[in-house]
Every structure is written in structure tokens, then in C-alpha cells.
Amino acid sequence: MEAAIEGVGKTQEKKKKKKGPREFDWTKATFGHYVLKLAYVGTNYHGLAWQEPSTCPTVEAALFEALQKTRLIQDRQSCNFSRCGRTDKGVHAAGNYVSLTLRLKPGSESGTDAFDYPSILNGVLPSDIRILAAAPAPSGFDARFSCLFRAYQYYFPHAGEDLQKMREAAAYFVGEHDFRNFCKMDVENITNYRRRVLSVSVRPLSDGVAEFAVTGVAFLWHQVRCMAAVLLLVGQGLEQPSVVQELLDVERYPRKPLYEPADESGLVLRDCGFEGVDFAPSSPKPAGESGLPTPSCAADTFRNLRDRQLRASAVASCLLAACGGEPPNAEREGKRKHVPLLQRPGCPTLQEKQQALEARRHRRKLTEGEEAKAEPAA
């Protein structure tokens, strides 16, 4: 009897072991190089690029978690990942792109037997990140280096700004210029601050909102937000349109005036351009237009977001009215005297920042050398 009971116990123990998660056999997997188009609301994320998820949640961290959960990739390091527009904290995207190696259906040898990647990933991604499309990547494709242009739109409340003056100022941006006075200089990674802007526009939209749209080959850190900040000062009558032309003259103005970039919540990466990708434009399109229609699941997500924002706007207007309403622009500006940009203190020049970086690196080398000398011999 005891032997029978012991036998039953062992059988149950074996069944429990069988119920455990099976190890995925990656040696049998086949892969193909794909490009994904994604849209996201950046409010809850510290930008696109991967950082330590426990301290800095990012769009890429959520994407990699979904990719690994669905076993479309084995890990982040081995999937040949490349991103196009590296959006900052709080910035949104209607059309960003990544390229990576994804697992194909079992038994696929031609490299074309793919899963429905958007449906699979949207089923596990957070609702504020949506995959809009997927397709095999062209030969030699890299989401960053194959990009022909990037198009951004900055939305702002239209509170009486002179949009015609903003257009005059924005026109100075078109062409190739040194934008060091319109960005946050990253001297550790960037030495050339010349960028080419292809087109700009400033136009009113509905519901008291206006838009600054800019398309360029590539952009610097905070560049679009800095451009928008200066244009808004022009629109408010606090600066002349020619201030843009003057700040682009880095020989005359080598120090960027101290000013804050425009709020990140209004910035959207609208789309990026590529050759050979069906759902990406190969030439710049007018502001507001993009590639293929948005999948219904993504449209529902962003429609719900828009409705929540409209409700929040109505509530804010109600509360503002309870406080006596909004004072005129002149009264609001009168509380804080405006100092013209060209009269403000300036940041260190690019050369000074580079010299400071070299000094820090030199001190670090000396410190490391002293620590190595102090280590006891093995």
C-alpha cells in the first residue's frame, strides 16, 4: 500500500514538472530583417531610446519587453536593432521607424513567411504604443542611416500670436546652417552642428491651436523645441523675425543666449522618409499627411486619447473661468519683463565646451592611473 501511494506521489510530481514553461529552442528559429512603423504618446516615457527600465521607462524598453514576451527576438543585443528618430522625454511620434531581425514562422526558409507582427505586438504593448505597419527591410537597410528626411510638427495654443511674423522668422531656417544656437549642444557625441532644413510652415488649426511644421534631413538635440521657442517669442511681438537670421550667424553670436526650449508635450515626430519601404514616404509630404491609413486598433487608441484631452481642456477652461478668466497677453507679459535674446547672458561657446570636455577626460585618465598604481600586486 505504501509503495502504491509513493508511486502515485512520484507520478503527480512528474506531472507538475511537465507543466513548467518549456524552454524555447532558438536553434530551430529562422529570421528576417524587418522594418516597423510605430506611433506612441511620449507622456509616460523618458524618450524613445532604451535606458534602465526600472528607473527610466522608455518606448524601446516596452517594445523590447513585448518582442521578447512574444519570442520574436531572443534578446536586445542580438537582433540587429536600429532606430530612426531618437525622440526625447515627453515627445510623441505619429510615424517613427525601427529595423531589426525578427523570427519567422516555423519552417520558413525563404525569409518571407512572416508573422502578423503588428497584431502580435499590439496585443501585448501598452495602449499608448502602437505598431502601425511592418514589412521586409530593403537590402542594406538601417533605420537611422537610410532615412532621407524627418518631419516634425509642434503644436501650440494660438493666443493671439502673429503667425505671419512667425512665418517670416521660420523662413530663415530653410537651407543648411549651423544650428548650435538652436539646440542643446552634445559635445561628447557631436562635433558638426550644421543641419539642412528642407521646409517650414506655420499655420492655424481648429480649436485655438496652431502648428509649426519643419522637415529636415536630420536634427540636433532639442533643435525643434528651440526653434519653436524663438518663433513663439517672435509671434508674441517680443522679438523681431530677423532674430533667427542673427542667431544663425554663429561667427557673430558664438554663445547661445539663455532661453528655455518650448514645452516637449507639443512636439510630434510626424513621419520619416525612406526609399523602398511601402508605408514610408520617399519624398516630403505636406504637413498633416502620412503614409498608409492607421490600423483600426491604433485609431481607436488615439481617438480615445483625443477625447480625453478634449474633456480635460473643457474642464480646465471651466476652472480658469472660475478664477476670473484669462488676462490679456499684454497683462501676462507685463508681470515678467522680457529681456531680448541678443542681450541675454550666453552659454559657453562650442570651443569652450570642447576644452572643458578634454579637461574632464584628462582628469579622469589621471585618476584612473593613480588608482591602478594604488592597487596591490596580485
Image (cartoon, rainbow, N blue to C red):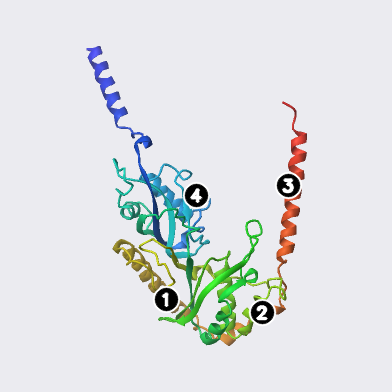
| N-terminal-most mark, 3 or 2 | 2
Q: Nearer the viewer, residue 163 or 13?
A: 163
- 107 sits left or right of 205 in the view: left
- Tag 2 near tag 1, CB within 8 Å: no
Residue carrying label 1: 286
Residue linked to disc 3: 364
Q: CA distance from mark 1 to mark 4?
A: 36 Å
- Secondary structure beneath dot 3 equals helix
**Marker disc for residue 246:** 2
Camera-side mark, 4 or 2: 2
Amino acid tagged 1 = Pro
Q: Residue at x 41, y 72 (%)?
A: 312
For marks 3 and 1, give the CA distance.
49 Å
Q: CA distance from mark 2 to mark 1?
A: 28 Å
Residue 53 is labelled as 4
- Residues tagged 3 and 1 counted as in contact (Cβ below 8 A): no
> What SS does tag 4 mark?
loop
Q: Which quadrant does the N terminus fall into?
A: top left
Please report the residue visible at 56 percent of the width from the left and 70 percent of the height from the top: 196
Instruction: Looking at the image, tell me whether mark 4 or mark 2 is earlier in sequence order.
Output: 4
Task: Determine the CA span between mark 3 and mark 2.
Answer: 38 Å
Q: Does label 1 or label 4 sit earlier along the sequence? A: 4
In the picture, measured across the screen, residue 261 lies left or right of residue 315, that is: right
